[in-house]
Image (spheres, coloured by chain):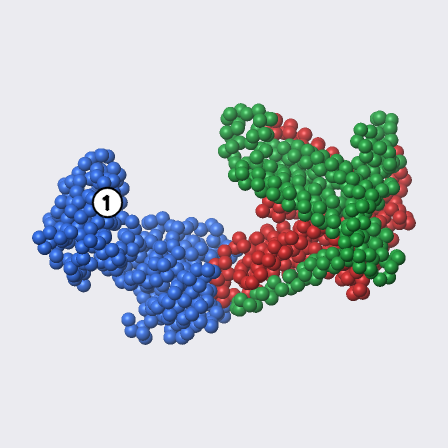
Chain colours: A blue, B red, C green
Amino acid sequence: MKEGSLAVKLENLKVVLGNKVVFKNLNLGFERGKLTVVLGPPGAGKTTMLKTIAGFIEPSEGKVIIEGKVVNDLPPSQRNVSMVFQTLALYPNMSVFENIAAPLTAQGLSKEEIEDKVYGIAKLLGITHTLDRKPETLSGGEYQRVAIARCLIKEAHVYLMDEPFINLDLKIRSNLRDELKKLAETLSKTLIFVTPDPIEALALGETIHVLIGGEVVQTGKGIELYKMPISLDVADYVGGGLFNIFKGEIIRKDSEYFFKNEDFIIKIPKELLLNDLPLNSEYFLLIMPENIKPRSFIEENYQHLTKGKAYSIEVLGGDTLIYYELESGNILKSLVNTIYRPSVGLEEELYFEPSEVILFNKDKVPVVKWNKYT
Amino acid sequence: MNVNKLLWTIIAFIIVNIYIFPVYWIYLTAFKDRATLFELPPKVIFTPVWDNFDELVRYGAIQAVLNSVIVTGVSIAISLFLGFLAAYALSRYRFPGKNLILFYIISTRMMPPIVFIIPIYMMFSYLGIKGSYLSMILFYIGLTLPFSVWMTKTFVDDVSIEIDQAAQLDGFTTFKFFRKILIPMIAPGLVAVLVFSLLSVWNEFLMANILSSPQTRPASVVLANIRGERGFNWGRVAALELIYTIPVVILIFLIQKYLVRGLTLGVVR
Amino acid sequence: MGNKKLFLFFVVPAVAYLFILNLFPLLWALGLSFFRYNLLTERVPTFVGLGNYGTILLDPAVWTRMQITGKFILISIPLQFTLGILIAFLLYKELYGRRLLLTLFLIPMLIAPVASALFFRYLLDANFGLVNWLLSEFFNTKIYWLGLGKVPGLGVEYALLTVALVETWIWTPFITLLVTAGLSTIPQSVIEQANIDDISFIDRVRYIVFPYIKPILGLALILRVMDSFKTFDTIYVLTAGGPGISTEIITFYIYKLAFQGWDFGSASALSFGVLVIILYFTTIFLNYFIFRGGEEQ
């Protein structure tokens, strides 16, 4: 990314909250006019990052640069940023109209101008019918949209959104996501969107920074994180706990590599590997549920994996996630693209797609090639 | 019409009113003329007159009530103001010694006033202000501040700090934020603090007795010392008591809704 | 809104004020207690170290007052609590205008103690009071409520009993208020279960109500005992400590020492002694209730 295209830049940032060092030495840039996602588990430092950019938290070291200017000494009100807070923080004793208008009233605009802008943004977000009401009377989705309207109504260098959809149900979330994406495109504003939910991050589809333990461990588009995770931790997190991760070792036989654990031995296609694999070491094998199927559902190229006993299913839209218990007691998840209800205890042979597996060494670093996706 | 409920209501009604009968009796007495006052058996039904109240005004006893109003009004206005600022800072900001300050504030509530009477008397005498409104006001601010700070802080704590931050981004100055957003949000709590402080000062006697002069005596002092007064007359005393206590009674009825919550809040929390 | 340091200034006025009007006088009083300083006999205070405290401990006058204080507390506290709890139960029932009744019942607590004491002085006047008139009409007796006569069976003078009764009248609503708050914390589901299981009233009180109001009662007990030591207004109005010394509870005695005897040294020492006692009881009770309460959780 070119320097000049960055709306926000964090340089060598060190942030300490109480006794905890949240960021040791953070370097991160956010491109102008784009929606960037910061994804990370609770405690990773997402809110801290936003609040440091906004100016509510002071870094102990390092610089916060907004549109080329170092803003460390500027209070939040002078940094030209706008924010949607995790608690949404609407003013309960003011009407929705007054809430949305609040950022503008301090700017000395005329009454007509304010009215125009408020109606404009309210129309964009579909909340014109709520303008005369008080926040406590709004539904969850409406409340959220008012908070977003208040954030977007003013001109700012960057718009910070702290888990804005977190407590809403899935359908509303998906609608709001689409609305936000469209808004970001039409208004071409710089948005930083923070969330702990990998599904949400992937659905937004834009550039994602994965923040774990105060460090950005990987940056990329959703699909890259999913298929080419930089570490096992990233993979596990992005997979939302659904990925199958097996611990085992590598053995070599007839110049072929095999991954072996208590449940199965499978061949690792040589074409996948970057280098030779050291033996006598711990390895992790990741297979995504959609790449494991029971016999009746297998496609070309699938090979036999192991035998498992079905014990639980989850229906996800048109797909079924089936939990199998293996002989060792380990659990394996398989995803089929239709509704399938095996009876509990049904023993099935399970097959997998060998070219889609990801192998990690003992340092949790992938040792497979990515050329398929570049 | 639930008969059981009605029955218990009547029982409760009778018991409660018997309990507060002394209040009714004095209020009645305030309207009795001289002759009726001494009649035995004491009359419950009679022709009410305003004589006692007139005499109060003529004797200048109304000044006492006025003094109460002045002293109470000024001291709680200042106490609430200082208390609010301190409560806000203590709630929102981290600074050295914060916990110590909080602990100190809470512990002052436990001190019996008797420990203070001598030093305060000496202090204010040296300062030459003993007997003035100022001495009482200064004392009462000190009396009500700890509770005022502590209680207000708990209400401010309940407001998420992100509201403050949103207001910052929206360009509100601190005092505009207080006026338009924070205070409206904690208004019921502030009412509770106001009422509690008001009662503490309005009803106070010990220090007022020590610190006031004949010109600045509030009603509590006048009433307590009434036995030795010339022109002592139960009718007039009753009238003064009525004027002194009625504002409190009216206030209680006005804020009935918040009463139970507000009063127990300070104790149960 | 700006600087964080700015907000330190919000706190400084309040803290400075409290230092000057609370901490400073407290320390001054402590200092005074180490001196013999009687405005009537000595112009200049003399340092006596712990002398005042020694004198107090040996002074029979002080012990008599402590006894009077003890009797006072032993009469008024149980009365307040019993009455307060009973009325709380009564007002807890389904009633029309319940909130109104509770509000009415709170009046004694919220009006000035001086005023309340005066109400009773009028009612209990030996010759013109309503109470004595009723007594003479129906029982052919007259009681000198503020006199030295001993109450049959109680071993205290009528004066002390009257003061205790007036204090009870004033503070019973406080107990009722707290118990009502405590009762409101009983979950509806528990009440309904009790109704279904048709538990007797006594068992209901023992096993359902009591656990919920016990912590509040404990707190109320500490507060009320501590406050009882500080009783002043009612005594000043009703008896001024008399007749004789029959109603001179310890804090009233301190007041007399200070502003009639002008013995600032002894008065300060005594007030600190009382403070220590109060704090001691508070810690005992707090420990008891924190421990016990903790276990039961």
Taking depth in this image into account, of A88 and B243 the one nearest to the observer is A88
Q: Amino acid at mark 1?
A: Lys
**Residue located 53% across and 66% down the image:** C4
Judge left or right: residue C32 versus residue A4.
right
Judge left or right: residue A317 versus residue B202.
left
When asked about the image quadrant of residue A23, the answer is bottom left
Taking depth in this image into account, of A82 and A303 the one nearest to the observer is A303
**Residue located 88% across and 57% down the image:** C40
Question: In this view of the protein, can residue A226 be seen by the observer?
Answer: no
- Whole-percent x, y for residue A253 in the image: 11, 51
Judge left or right: residue A265 versus residue A15.
left
Residue C144, compared with residue C14, is above or below; it is above
Secondary element at image label 1: strand
Taking depth in this image into account, of A304 and A184 the one nearest to the observer is A304
Q: Which residue is mark 1?
A: A333
Q: How many marks?
A: 1
Residue A284, compared with residue A158, is above or below; it is above
Q: Circle 1: is it few (<14), some (14-19), or many (20+) Cα within 10 Å?
A: many
